[in-house]
Amino acid sequence: MAGRVIAIDGPAASGKSSVSRGVANDLGWLFVSSGHFYRAIAWGILRDQVGTESTASWVAGRKLSLLKETGGISLLLDGENATPHLTKAEVASKVSVIAAVPDVRDFINARLRALAVDHDLVMEGRDIGSVVFPESPWKFYLDASPEERARRRTREGAVDSVTERDRLDSTRSTAPLTIAPGATVIDTTHLNLQQVIAAVLSHLSGLKDS
C-alpha cells in the first residue's frame, strides 16, 4: 500500500459519507465510498437478472473500473456507467444481501486495495478499518442513535429501514459491521456535519501538509 488511507466506518445514516467527503476535500485526497462499489454490483445483478445461486460465478467474470472525474470517481461495470443507477430503490434494497456473499466482498475488496497503490484515500464503508485496511493508523467509527439515523434517512428520501440494515450488516458471517481495533469512535447524534469533520480532522494533524 503506497498511498495512505483514512478509514471511516459506521452504520447506515451515521454521516460517514458526507464526513468522509468533507475530510477528503480538506486534505486534497481522493474520496471513495465502498458502498458505491456494492451498489454497482447490485445494479449489475439486477440488470443481468442473476439468481442468488449464480452470484459468485457471475461476479468473477465482471470488469469493474474507475473513471476519475472532478470531485470524485464514477464506476463502470463492464464498460457501462453504473453511477446514475446507484441511488435507485431496487438497488439499495439489494445491497445488504449481495454484501453478505464472500465472493462479492473479495471481488470488491481487491479493487478497493488496488486504489491505495496510487492514491491517498479517505474511504468510508462498514469494514474498511476492520477488514479492508486494518493496518491503517487512521481509523474512525461514526455512530448515532437509531432514532436520529432513521430521521436522516427519511430526510434523504430513502425507503430502507436502518433497523433492518443494522441487523443484516451486523449479523452476516462475512465481515460483519464492527468497531475496528484502535478506531476512534465519534457519536454524531447531536453534531452537525462541520462539527464531525472538525472532530475527525483534529486526530489527523500534520496530514494536510505532509
Image (cartoon, rainbow, N blue to C red):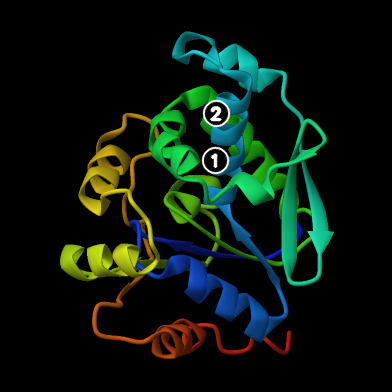
| Mark 2 crowd level (few <14, some 14–19, many ≥20, 10 Å Cα) | many
Q: Position of residue 76 (x, y in %)?
A: 76, 42
The reply to whether residue 82 is visible in this rendering is yes
Residue shown at the point (32%, 42%) measured from the top left: 169
Mark 2: which secondary structure? helix
Q: Quadrant of residue 204?
A: bottom right
Q: Which mark is residue 59?
A: none
Q: Is residue 59 above or below residue 77?
A: above
Q: Pick whichever, 99 or 102, lies toward us.
A: 99
Q: Pick whichever, 126 or 53, lies toward us.
A: 53
Q: Position of residue 86 (x, y in %)?
A: 57, 47
Residue mark closest to the camera, 2 vs 1: 1
Residue shown at the point (34%, 40%) measured from the top left: 176
Q: Which mark is residue 104?
A: 2
Left or right of 34, for residue 93: left
Left or right of 202, for residue 10: left
Q: Amino acid at mark 1?
A: Tyr
Q: Is residue 115 above or below residue 50?
A: below
Q: CA distance from mark 2 to mark 1?
A: 8 Å
Contact? badges 2 and 1 (CB < 8 Å): yes
Please give the residue where the numbered disc 1 appears in the rendered image. 38
Q: Pick whichever, 6 or 92, lies toward us.
A: 92
